Amino acid sequence: MKSFFTHLECLSCGKVYPKGEYYLCPSCNGFLDPKYDYDGIADEFDPKELPFRVHSIWKWFEFLPIEEERNVVTLGEGDTPLIRCRRINEEVGMRNLYLKDETVNPTGSLKDRSTSVNVSVAKELGVETVAIISTGNAAASLAAYAARGGLKAVVMVPETTPEGKVVQALVHGALVLKVRAKSMSEFYWLYREACSKFGWMDSIGGINPYRNEGKKTYAYELSEAFRWDPPEWFIIPMAGGNALIAAWKGFKELISLGLISRTPKLVGVQPKECAATVKAFRDGKDVAEPVSPGQTIVTSLVVPNPGPKSSLVLKAIRESEGTCDDPSDDEVLDAMRLLAKEGVFSEPGGAISLAAAKRLVDQGVIDPSDRVVCLITGSGFKDIKSVEMILKKPLIIHPTLESLEKALREPAF
Ligand SMILES: *Cc1c(COP(=O)(O)O)cnc(C)c1O
């Protein structure tokens, strides 16, 4: 397959860099954006070929920053199911509700889309060790892909990280470090010092310029699934907002190639107890101010200081004429219960998009007949503790029909 990646370009000062181990712009600290030869893509890319391609993000090879196909490190990430809701429509008040089910990705979260690109670039550049700071999912994902690609991984996580995610990172052989830091800034300081001192590839979504390209594939997959007439709304759980920025870039690429003629409105969602970007959106600000987070079960989305990247998030949401929302933990738990009714087992961070959809319909922002896609970003298997809160204990019975019949009279979950 032919590569159309051309260079990196600073979103702030416009300086251009060749592909290499760049992170933020060496000249102004701005974000670097991968660029492509779109005329070339327009000539070569034929959507009619799509059904015959691989079932992963690499179906969209022309739009990804890898030059040689042999450097691709993949576990079949992306191309996830788009599930039309049947059981919960009445309860949520929507007739055309869809779930983009990211729980079935190789390591159980959306992170695999970005990690696959991240580790493939690392391989192409000859990097030996990749590193990340993470609330768990990105760490587990990086560990798995590094293992697959024959690279070393160092992952730093907060001590409160759910056990399932820590075990996942350990099983794939990453060096897992729980950092007992007094503040997030101390934590980041150590990480950054280590990356530069030991030459590890910084794999944080907000810094590594290649990583986010993997999440542009949301725009492509949704456009293809809806026959190049994207849905009215795409609702995205946000930590740093990388998925949202990436999806927006993808939709704009498809517009410029003439493959779609309009885009969905994007909704960025954060937990009520840590909603820095949502607050900035409501206050009409261009960048998010740090917040001090409260207790929440939505641990994967806790980013108290989204920093300058939040300006790109806010810009994308406003350009798309979308909005923001911040459901409470109780609303998230209720959304987990609803998803389970459709057969999808989500972690709190994944279910928050459905919680927001329900709120926005109740507020009259979303019309009940609009086509709405909720991104369900991570599996419930990794965070059993918060799921247990909405469940009854299993019944214990004796091996007699009498005991069984008594149990059958209990109201079901
Ligand atoms: C990482 C993550 C997200 C999104 O993170 P962004 O940085 O905003 O792309 C959403 N949900 C879950 C469960 C995650 O782990």
Image (spheres, rainbow, N blue to C red):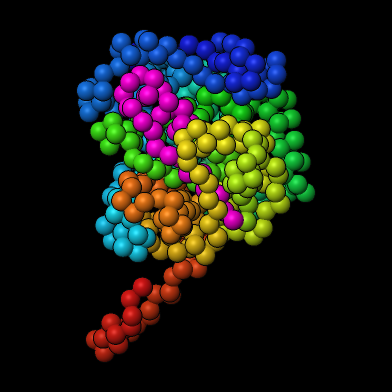
Q: In the rendered image, which quarter is residue 296 located in?
A: bottom right
Q: Position of residue 412 (x, y in %)?
A: 33, 76
Q: Tell which of 330 and 382 is nearer to you.
A: 330
Residue at 25% x, 26% y: name it. 50
- Reply above or below: 397 against 150: below
Residue at far front of view = 364
Q: Position of residue 57 (x, y in %)?
A: 37, 30
Is 250 placed left or right of 341 in the picture? right
Q: Tell which of 180 and 93 is nearer to you.
A: 93
Is 347 placed left or right of 10 in the picture? left
Q: Position of residue 190 (x, y in %)?
A: 74, 36
Segment tinted magenta in the rendering: 245-272
Residue at 46% x, 19% y: name it. 65
Q: Is residue 26 visible?
A: yes
Is 171 placed left or right of 229 in the picture? right
- Reply above or below: 162 against 1: below
Residue 406 drawn in magenta? no
Residue 256 drawn in magenta? yes
Residue at 70% x, 49% y: name it. 291
Q: Tell which of 186 and 224 is nearer to you.
A: 224
